[in-house]
Amino acid sequence: MLPHPFTVERVRRETHDTFTLELKGTNGIGGFSFAPGQFNMLYRFGTGEVPISISGDPERSDTLVHTIRAVGTVTESMERLKKGDIIGVRGPFGRGWPVLEARGCDVLIVAGGIGLAPLRPVMYRLLSRREQYGKIAILYGTRTPSDILYSKELEQWRSRFDLQVRVTVDRGEKDWKGHIGVVTTLIPRASFDPHEAVAMICGPEVMMRFTIRELEKRGVRRSNIHVSMERNMKCGIGFCGHCQYGPTFVCKDGPVFPYEKIEHIFRIREI
Amino acid sequence: MHTLEPILTEHPFLKGLNHAYIQLITGCARNVRFEPGQFLFREGEEANEFYIIRHGRVVMEIFTPERTAIPIQTVEEGEIIGWSWLIPPYHWHFDAQAVDMVRAIALDGKCLRNKCEEDHDMGYELLKRFAHIMEQRLQAARLQLLDVYHPHSGVAGPSARALKNKKR
Amino acid sequence: MKPFFIIHRNSLDSLFGALVGRNFTLVGPTLRDRAVAYSEIATVNDLPFGWTDEQDGGTYRLKKSDRQTLFDYAAGPHSWKKFLFPPALQLWEAERQIGPHEASPEYPPSHEGRGEQPRYAMIGVRSCDLHAIAVQDKVFAEGSHRDPTYEARRKNLFIVAVNCSHGGGTCFCRSMNTGPRATSGFDLALTEILEADRHVFLAESGSDRGAQVLREVTQEEAQESDIRAAERITADASVPMGRLMDTTDIRGLLYNNYDHPRWDHAAARCLACGNCTIVCPTCFCNTVEDFTDLAGTRAERRRRWDVCFAVDFSYIHGGSVRSTIRSRYRQWLTHKVATWIDQFGTSGCVGCGRCITWCPVGIDITEEVREIRANRPDDRKTLSEVGHAHT
């Protein structure tokens, strides 16, 4: 339960309410290995602790990267961190995305809003072993053009010939020439083999529900759909009971679940 | 003059449609092109056509005096725009503007309506395809309405409001 | 067959002495605030002598008994979990240090589960509570992560169980297969036998250290008649047992009835006070809170029991997942008797009845389960079918 002190190496502003921290271990803590989709508990001295997914490159274990949305006291205080500041880290926790199981398959990544952050490590992993996967499509939807996360990286990825990158916004802005419409409208346009595709979805629950419906329409097997769930978390290790989701603990049985495993409770209200 | 029939046959909206119907529809079709910024149609105008997009992106907008044009949705290659020609009084409910150069096939609504009245089987086939698109757009509009990425839209219910100011 | 021994009422103190001699802190039932409460004890005189109780939904009343017994009452408002899983605990503290970056001098945190943990000897643990301890063992000491405080205290623990002679008004251990007779999980188990001319305890050991202690305290082997008397006593305890719960496929029952109208019925009465979670011997939910001193130089993290009936228990940015009392009561009950089985391979309910007695409005877990079972719509769709209906 002890947070390890990490030093802030860099703070990068992403959008008006999101920022990325690059952290390095102190006190001789060197590498930090994690699986794409896992999360850490980040602690701000005296203020509190929050669960944040890891959004860096799993191959680069020297730097720990977290993209955070400032929506509460703790995350807002983290927004004020500067290079050289110390932050506490516990983790990594949870089960991640099925990047190994997806080898040999087409991969469909559907992200909504800040939900792109826990999927970015998947992208790094897929691209570092590009030959092991079939078609890869990233479908990303967010609120407005100025809410687009990692826009430079998305641009770079879009310029590759071996990737489909589609970005949409719920609300257009004046100079936006791109797609307008919810992320589910991108699904019929993506090119993949529904019978051999593994889908990884992260975003607000309602967005994931609509997305799954659209994927099923295209014939993607339920057993190949994976979702990342969010619940209140205090401990990260299954002691505190807060993150219960039906019979599961999101912190240790998730946050990534095969849709099949939670399908029976996925649409039950207030579970 | 070459016919539009092969293009219509291949378009996702009409794919799989009986060949005889395609021929009938081809009789109501013409090739059109819009420059970036050009309007396909405007709100309130008579809806005499609908468009099968072959290339480019069209934005559907509603104009408000306070916020100028609010873009609602974009449609692209492989999709269609417009069903007001099907529903009386046959007027457009929004503006449609080309974002970039748009190539499309315009189908004459009156001509199609007549053909559908004459041949209900064809009418039903077409209506099914439109119903599918209407359903998709309705679902999308509902999801859009939820504004799901807004920080305080994650969870509905009274507590969302109660806790809104109790930030953590 | 294990030999049974006899400890006389007057030599019970020598048992306590043997435990104190082994550096145990004795904790057991005492009278406090007109209830039986577990706290530190020194001698037999601290136990509730000649008392019994009456319990029902929302009702608890201590009564003078006409029998001069020490253990003739059912579970009180306390459970033993407070000794192993303290209601409040400092997890660690950290001091702000002036380091290389003067602008950002911080910590590191120190001491986790360090410091000596108490060595408790629990006197008078009932069979249901032995099972409750075993349930919490699975949560805190048998998973992939272990709680150091719990583990240390649990390792030190010495348990003297007492077999029930009195079936409480809200008890249903028989339904949960958790009593009334203690069968394992103790160092010593006692059955109180009060006859016209003698007051003794039939004692058996459940561990090597239990056997050692027992040898020090008594040499008197039990007679066949004593053993039969003790058997009669525990058998009697289950005859007037106040409650029953049919646990047949209880997981399936609850998983198929998330939308049962009965939840509204419970929600209309439930005050969301959380009493049931506090008195429950297995409820383990907790939260952590971070503090600093005014100068901002010292920080600490404390853990305390939490209550799943609180609105912000399920808070994620934007709001609470379980915003209605209906969903929170449903979560508590479904977790207790159904999802717990998936999580830990055992029911979270041991049938002690505390949640029924201490509910201020008398909501009864056995009644709720019974009503859900009795009024299932016959043509109910399966969950997955319900899940896929859309408009």
Image: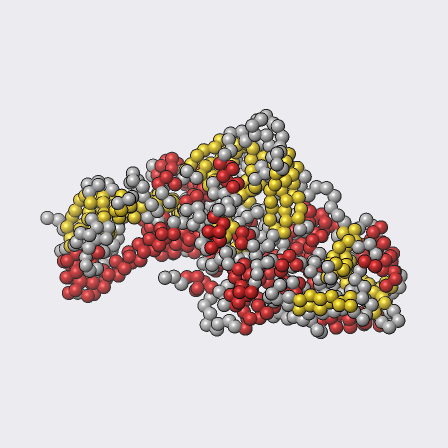
- The location of residue C67, given as percent across then percent down, is 81, 70
Apparent side of residue A8 relative to residue C129 in the rendered image (left or right)? left
Apparent side of residue B92 relative to residue C364 in the rendered image (left or right)? left
Residue shown at 76% from the left, 60% from the top: C31
The answer to whether residue B154 is above or below residue C234 is above
Apparent side of residue A116 relative to residue C263 in the rendered image (left or right)? left
Residue shown at 25% from the left, 54% from the top: B13
- The location of residue B75, given as percent across then percent down, is 27, 48
Residue shown at 77% from the left, 71% from the top: C233
Residue shown at 56% from the left, 65% from the top: C269
The answer to whether residue C382 is above or below residue A224 is below
Q: Nearer the viewer, residue C361 or C333?
A: C361
Q: Nearer the viewer, residue C75 or C30?
A: C30
Q: Quadrant of residue C239?
A: bottom right
Apparent side of residue B123 relative to residue C120 in the rendered image (left or right)? left
Q: Is residue A227 visible?
A: no
Q: Nearer the viewer, residue C255 or A105?
A: C255
- The location of residue A220, given as percent across then percent down, is 39, 54
